[in-house]
């Protein structure tokens, strides 16, 4: 097989993989995997917001990764007790938090530091807020409300 | 002598070119009905709306709400709404199931369109409200819509929306067929098994090549209920919820047509002798295959996936995997009741039965000649599961009302033994044989110890529910002897 053929085959495989991932792996599907109506209602009552996160990494879609993510987030100041939800497939997590965007950024920084050894990383996908529903987070570095 | 006038050279060339083009077209055959240049492959992005729908959960003149599908609405633009809801539905007599729906019904309404039509679709996730006259104990959750009839980006159009959100998008059906629609939110298996599916019928641009007298939609699907762990009841009857383990291992309790155990026996599809019938058949699954058959006739035409280009003639059955469909057309030869059945008879015994009633109103629904009486199977989910266990583990040694085999005939067993005794016996026959006089008497009579089948208490209770059912049914039958 020539180098060009190999490159073409590689591209096809990559496209195939992307297609296979299309079902159940788009952002909203990952949010749905950890969406808990009760948590959103509780957050609304208590003036909190809910963060929905994707778990990235080579072995993200495993029970071990879900457990590691739960361990990493549990107990961090600002994560509202009893609101943490984690799913293995699709790999996602959610929790209600108190405070502003900077507080959320600190929570994610702490969790991601704890997850480095496991080769995992949390990525913010959506935020739920009473009256606004599910919204996209602002691009990194942008100011304003989420 | 004058020669007749000849056309100029340029004119002759034009005539030749025209003839050549006509000849080329004739050789090429008719135009390709699936010419991609006529397809819509650039749909506009979906929109998320703040406003939520109120009022009916389904709307649109192109929708049909029963098995009798309406004729095609000739309008090119079709606006439809299919909102999601959670509600309790009855999937078998006395079995109240916690369902998730499109359009507040299971299956969802049927959309009928034509290739090239424009579908304007919108959906509010109303799982956070209770529809008038409905009951639900299910927590609201995210849902989505996946139209197999559309060619669109799943990440854009089929995204999940939260309770209270509304999504809207347009699409154009490019191919004719009988297409499934369903919720595509994880776990997809659970959303489909809970009732979130329906059919889109897409006719060819030029319509179907045959004429029929009747058209009906038949949708096969499976249910996997278990008693609600929270013990909810409706009108004193227990509520059932999805058994998330059995759905993964494909151990269905009911396999049904149009959302209900023997539903199309209770409400047959009507026809007259001599008429030609067209059925739009979809097997939803979510996991099992259907071998669709109509007793007493032959499918003159089968259009696989509902596309007349995929034609088979003279078929006895059509095999449909999950999300596979077909249009079947047949003649009703004479007066009678023609039984629709999944010829995987294990599925038929779970409720995949229906009737084409061309009897002119004969009141009975006698199916005995086909050995699939409508009452041959219990409808209570516990008893149905008990029957499955019985047929898997007990039937080699025991009969019900057909006399003793290696072991005793079990008809009347619930009148002879208490439920407590039966639970102990089914769970631990070896232990019972050491100390229980009745067990020892049975061993003496049949000379063969009852083997330990490794039944759990739950399985024993399911079996006993089945025993109670056939003892209720068997009042008119002779009692078993042992």
Image (cartoon, rainbow, N blue to C red):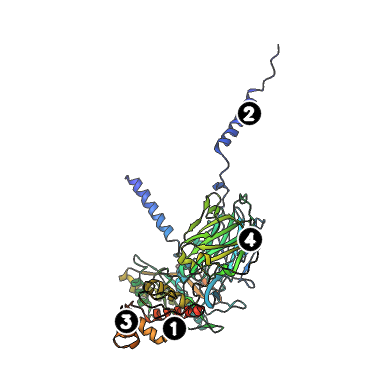
- Asked whether the residues under the numbered discs 1 and 4 touch, taking CB atoms below 8 Å apart as contact, a structural biologist would say no
| Crowding near the residue tagged with mark 4, few <14, some 14–19, many ≥20 C-alpha atoms within 10 Å | many
The answer to whether marks 4 and 2 sit on the same chain is yes
Q: Nearer the viewer, residue B408 or B458?
A: B408
> From what the image shows, is residue B285 above or below residue A113?
above
Disc 4 chain ID: B
Q: Residue at x 34, y 65 (%)?
A: A58
Q: Kindly report which numbered mark, 4 or 3, lies closer to the viewer in this rendering.
A: 3
Residue ranking furthest to the top: B1
Which numbered disc covers residue B443? 3
**CA separation in Å, label 1 and label 4:** 44 Å
Q: Nearer the viewer, residue B380 or A121?
A: B380
Q: Kindly report which numbered mark, 1 or 2, lies closer to the viewer in this rendering.
A: 1
**CA separation in Å, label 3 and label 1:** 19 Å
On screen, residue B81 versus residue B428, left or right, reads right
**CA separation in Å, label 1 and label 2:** 93 Å
Label 4 or label 2, whichever comes before in sequence order: 2
Q: Secondary structure at mark 2?
A: helix
**CA separation in Å, label 2 and label 3:** 100 Å
Label 3 or label 1, whichever comes before in sequence order: 1
Residue at image mark 2: B15
On screen, residue B12 versus residue A8, left or right, reads right
Q: Secondary structure at mark 4?
A: loop
Disc 1 chain ID: B
- Asked whether the residues under the numbered discs 4 and 2 touch, taking CB atoms below 8 Å apart as contact, a structural biologist would say no
Residue at image mark 1: B414
**CA separation in Å, label 4 and label 3:** 56 Å
Q: Residue B450: horizontal and vertical position, in percent?
A: 33, 79
In what quadrant of the picture does the C terminus of chain B appear? bottom left
Residue at image mark 4: B271
| Crowding near the residue tagged with mark 2, few <14, some 14–19, many ≥20 C-alpha atoms within 10 Å | few
Q: Residue A60: horizontal and vertical position, in percent?
A: 36, 68
């Amino acid at each position: 097989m020539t180098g060009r053929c190999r490159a073409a085959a590689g591209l096809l495989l990559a496209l195939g993989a992307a297609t296979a991932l299309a079902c159940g792996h788009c952002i909203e599907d990952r949010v749905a995997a950890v969406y808990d109506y009760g948590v959103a209602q509780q957050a609304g009552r208590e003036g909190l917001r809910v963060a929905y996160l994707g778990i990235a990494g080579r072995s993200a879609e495993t029970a071990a990764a879900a457990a590691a993510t739960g361990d990493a987030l549990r107990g961090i100041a600002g994560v509202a007790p009893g609101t943490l939800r984690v799913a293995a497939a699709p790999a996602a997590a959610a929790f209600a938090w108190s405070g502003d965007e900077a507080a959320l950024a600190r929570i994610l920084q702490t969790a991601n530091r704890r997850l480095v050894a496991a080769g995992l990383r949390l990525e913010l996908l959506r935020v739920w807020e009473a009256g606004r529903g599910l919204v996209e987070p602002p691009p990194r570095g942008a100011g304003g409300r989420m | 002598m004058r020669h007749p006038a000849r056309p100029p050279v340029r004119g002759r060339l034009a005539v030749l070119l025209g003839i050549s083009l006509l000849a080329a077209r004739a050789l090429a055959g008719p135009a390709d009905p699936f010419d991609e240049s006529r397809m819509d492959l650039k749909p506009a992005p979906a929109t998320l709306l703040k406003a939520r729908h109120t009022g009916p959960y389904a709307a649109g003149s192109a929708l049909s709400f029963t098995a009798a599908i309406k004729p095609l609405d000739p309008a090119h633009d079709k606006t439809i709404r299919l909102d999601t809801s959670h509600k309790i539905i009855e999937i078998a007599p006395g079995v109240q199931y916690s369902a998730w729906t499109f359009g507040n019904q299971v299956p969802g309404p049927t959309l009928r369109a034509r290739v090239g039509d424009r579908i304007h679709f919108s959906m509010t996730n109303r799982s956070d409200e209770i529809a008038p006259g409905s009951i639900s104990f299910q927590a609201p959750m995210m849902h989505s819509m996946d139209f197999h009839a559309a060619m669109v980006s799943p990440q854009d159009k089929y995204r999940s929306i939260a309770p209270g959100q509304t999504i809207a998008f347009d699409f154009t059906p490019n191919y004719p067929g009988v297409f499934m629609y369903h919720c595509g939110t994880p776990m997809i298996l659970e959303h489909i098994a809970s009732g979130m599916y329906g059919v889109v019928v897409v006719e060819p641009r030029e319509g179907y090549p045959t004429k029929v007298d009747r058209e009906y939609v038949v949708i096969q699907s499976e249910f996997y209920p278990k008693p609600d762990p929270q013990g909810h009841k409706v009108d004193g009857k227990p509520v059932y919820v999805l058994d998330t383990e059995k759905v993964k291992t494909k151990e269905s309790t009911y396999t049904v047509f149009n959302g209900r155990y023997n539903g199309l026996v209770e409400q047959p599809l009507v026809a007259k002798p001599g008429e030609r019938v067209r059925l739009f058949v979809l097997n939803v699954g979510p996991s099992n295959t259907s071998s669709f058959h109509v007793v007493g006739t032959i499918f003159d035409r089968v259009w696989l996936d509902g596309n007349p280009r995929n034609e088979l003639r003279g078929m006895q059955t059509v095999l449909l995997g999950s999300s596979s469909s077909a249009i079947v057309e047949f003649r009703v030869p004479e007066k009678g009741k023609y039984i629709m059945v999944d010829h995987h008879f294990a599925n038929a015994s779970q409720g995949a039965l229906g009737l084409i009633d061309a009897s002119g109103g004969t009141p009975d629904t006698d199916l005995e000649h086909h050995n699939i009486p409508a009452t041959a199977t219990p409808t209570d989910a516990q008893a149905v599961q008990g029957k499955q266990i019985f047929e898997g583990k007990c039937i080699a040694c025991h009969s019900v009302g057909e006399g003793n085999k290696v072991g005793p005939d079990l008809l009347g067993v619930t009148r002879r033994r208490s439920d407590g005794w039966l639970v102990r016996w089914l769970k631990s026959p070896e232990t019972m044989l050491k100390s229980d006089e009745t067990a020892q008497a049975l061993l003496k009579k049949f000379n063969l110890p009852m083997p330990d089948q490794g039944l759990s208490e739950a399985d024993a209770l399911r079996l006993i529910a089945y025993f109670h059912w056939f003892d209720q049914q068997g009042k008119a039958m002779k009692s078993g002897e042992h």
